[in-house]
Amino acid sequence: MSTLIIPWKLERPLPPFEGGDIRYPEGLVRHFIKTHTKTGDRVFDPFAGHGTTLFVAEDMRRIPYGMEADEQRHAWAAGQLDHWQNMRLGDSAAMGRMNFPKMDFCMTSPPFMPKRDKWNPLYAGNPKFAGYDRYLTRLETIFTCLKPIMKRGAKLVVQVDNLTRGNVFTPLVRDMGTAISQSFTQIDEHIILWKTPRPGYDHTTCLVFTA
Ligand SMILES: C[S@@+](CC[C@H](N)C(=O)[O-])C[C@H]1O[C@@H](n2cnc3c(N)ncnc32)[C@H](O)[C@@H]1O
């Protein structure tokens, strides 16, 4: 376990269609890719979002792969990658059918859900799958699908925050860690202090697992 200090600095512009910023900074990804991979390794992100993991991997001469369910984000990120064909559009629960090769490393940040919400971000809010319990079950399923895509002993880094809304605290670091631990073995935890914090958001957590 350790505390790392990383600048909160986004090096790429946000896409024009995006209202809120849901990216992690490039420096965070660079730290973990440097620690856990070498040139030519395959790096995967099953919740690729705006493609930060993939862009940094490509910049560092690793081979990026990813999945993203949102069409606009997928098109925006894939359109700027040399390895654009490695970023697939779709639900990452289907990653086993995408013919991905075995990965050397995975870094990701799943969408976060407060426990009293009904809207489940892993199903784009489909009311049939509402609620925090279904969110955690789906996370468990997705990480179970990830396991066979990872090389044995490969590392997985997951960035996650606990959430506070009013008086309601969601222990997402614990709950997500438990869901992922059904398929992976947790070996470490890092507290990241943002060097230039934004109000109400001065740190995050990165959980490290091995396949
Ligand atoms: C927190 S964002 C990831 C941001 C990313 N780390 C970055 O820096 O750009 C989570 C992403 O997961 C996507 N997502 C949600 N459910 C998904 C699913 N079932 N399969 C694949 N992607 C999904 C969302 O559309 C969102 O873009």
Image (cartoon, grey):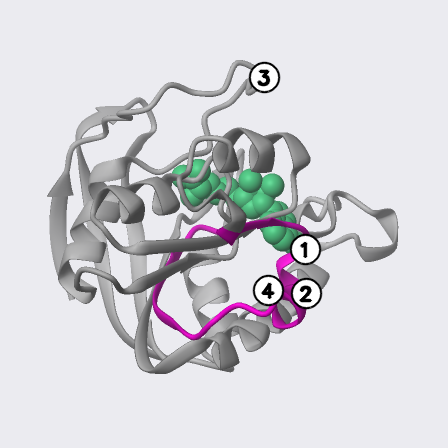
Q: Which residue bears the numbered disc 2?
A: 94
- Residue 152, numbered circle: none
Which of discs 4 and 1 lies nearer the camera? The answer is 1
Q: Quadrant of the C terminus?
A: bottom left
Asked if the residues shown at circle 2 and circle 1 are in contact, with their CB atoms under 8 angstroms apart, the answer is yes
Q: Is mark 4 within 8 Å of ligand 1?
A: no
Q: Is mark 1 within 8 Å of ligand 1?
A: yes
What is the spatial separation of the Cα atoms under label 3 and label 4, in whole angstroms? 27 Å
Residue 92 position within the rendered picture, expressed as x and y whole percent measured from the top left: 62, 59
Q: Which residue bears the numbered disc 4?
A: 139
* N-terminal label among 4 and 1: 1
What is the spatial separation of the Cα atoms under label 4 and label 2, in whole angstroms? 13 Å
Asked if the residues shown at circle 3 and circle 2 are in contact, with their CB atoms under 8 angstroms apart, the answer is no
* N-terminal label among 3 and 2: 3
Q: Using the rendered view, name the quadrant where residue 102 is placed.
A: bottom left
Q: Which residue bears the numbered disc 3?
A: 17
Q: Is residue 35 visible?
A: yes
**At numbered mark 1, what does the secondary structure look like: helix, strand or loop?**
loop
**Looking at the image, residue 79 lies above or below residue 162:** above
* N-terminal label among 3 and 4: 3
